[in-house]
Amino acid sequence: MDNNKAKVDDHGEPHYAEIMNKNNNGGFIKCLIVEWNKTENLKGYSLISSQSPLLRLKILAIAAISMLMLLTSAILLEFTALSETMKPKILSLRSSHIGIFGAPERIYENNGYLMVSSNGGLNQMRAGISDMVAIARYLNVTLVVPELDNTSFWNDRSQFQDIFDVDYFIEYLRDEVKIVKELPQGMKKRIASRYLYSMPPVSWSNMSYYYKTILPRIKKHQVVHFTKTDARLANNGIPLEVQKLRCRVNYKALRFSSNIEMVGKKIVKIMRQNGPFLVLHLRYEMDMLAFSGCYQSLNEKEMEELTAMRYAYPWWKVKEIDSNSVRSIGICPLTPEETALTLKALGINPRMQIFIAAGDIYGGEKRMAPLREAFPNLIKKETLLDPSDLEPFHNHSNKMAALDYIVSIESDIFVPTYSGNMDKVVEGHRRYLGYKTTIIPNRYVLVRLIDQYRNGTISWEEFSRVVKLAHARRGGPITRSVVPLRPKLEDYFYSNPQECLPQGSS
């Protein structure tokens, strides 16, 4: 028996319940036409008029039911489409059209506008901007090109387009999220006549916070302004495609402006011509020492100067600091002398080029003397380039930091002496590029070993052996730590963007 045929009842007529249980309207209508044709006994007569009244009634009933089912299906399809638009859209919801960068172009629906004021130095802002793009994408809101921090210690008046290629940023992400350089005129006037709803998002929040708390505010006010962007998105517990978008923004979309790229590549080219090179992010600058309260080897006048600076900046919350205590737990940046001992113990060739990625070292050449004696081939961008190359960068610390970032990414070895934002973001970028050699000093271990070596408790051979053992991992893959309820103790996402990394080790 053909299982595709409708069953018949005791009268030899189709069992209509079976016909109506067909999975689709097309199959149902086909069955209906077949059954109508079976009832046509006389040619030249009307199909319906030639049948018995009972059968004519059944045929009309089937036709009415078919129309009802078609209408119901159309309503259900419309309802399904409408309900989909009400769901939070994650990155996989795209159309089949391929955009200019190879990514499928996204069907965009605007829930409002998000304005952000990035806070901190260059790399803190860079990570924060990457988070803001991911948040805007998830909430289906239009992102206004971020405003950069002009008020913190660095006092750099540069704006987004001065540091990054803004047109490339917008175009690269056009199939992910809509980004505009400024609000539409009508929205500007509306805000001017009322007020701009501003707030700092809760730190280390997951995506549900933004959907449940922030999105309703954007829909209500149409524009929401975030006053801070640093660490506003959690390291862990974030959807995979959101994590990957954070990486695409940070490592692809945030390309430096053409002038910065040109000068940065020039530095790399000159150094490459002279062989391998190491970049040392020597964070022994005035602001870092004042902020951290790390006064080892400083005289009384220097300590007073740094303390006065710490009290002058209200956003540096901790004022009273015991220098020896913070050093003992590994919080202080390594001094130039401690750095020299560490690099020697690690077996770095004393003739290797070492590019100093930093601003002015506190104490000048006097404090740099132990490092220069151990590694005489120290190089800074100010001594490597013609003054005309750096003239556009003067009094623009974020532009200078961008040059250091480019050289750090391209170096054969990267060694930071602290764990600041640049160190973390560069570490993550180098992981992303294939686990390029990066040595992160374990300062908690090092300060103890250095003190023992200075006191004569251990020999140089033992000192070097233990230092090498403590730094055996040099940029290879590692699982990002998860510390529930203590996100600051976790590995920072941008130092270890595990979801985006290549397989294998260095």
Image (tube, rainbow, N blue to C red):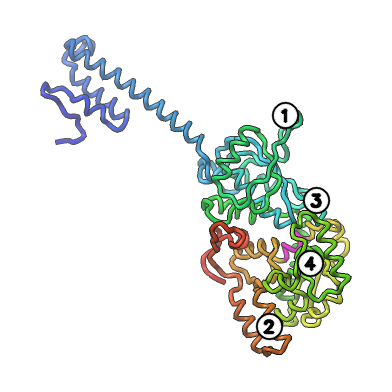
For residue 480, above or below residue 136 = below
Where is residue 124? Give x, y as percent: 70, 56
Q: How many marks?
A: 4
Residue topped by disc 2: 345
Residue topped by disc 4: 289
The reply to whether callout 1 and callout 4 are in contact (CB within 8 Å) is: no
Q: Real-space Cα distance between discs 3 and 1?
A: 27 Å
Residue topped by disc 3: 151
The reply to whether callout 4 and callout 3 are in contact (CB within 8 Å) is: no
Left or right of 265, for residue 31? left
Dot placed on the residue nearer the N-terminal end, 3 or 2: 3
Disc 3 element: loop
Quadrant that contains the C terminus: bottom right
Disc 1 element: helix
Q: Residues within 10 Å of mark 2 (few under 14, many from 20)?
A: some
Dot placed on the residue nearer the N-terminal end, 2 or 1: 1
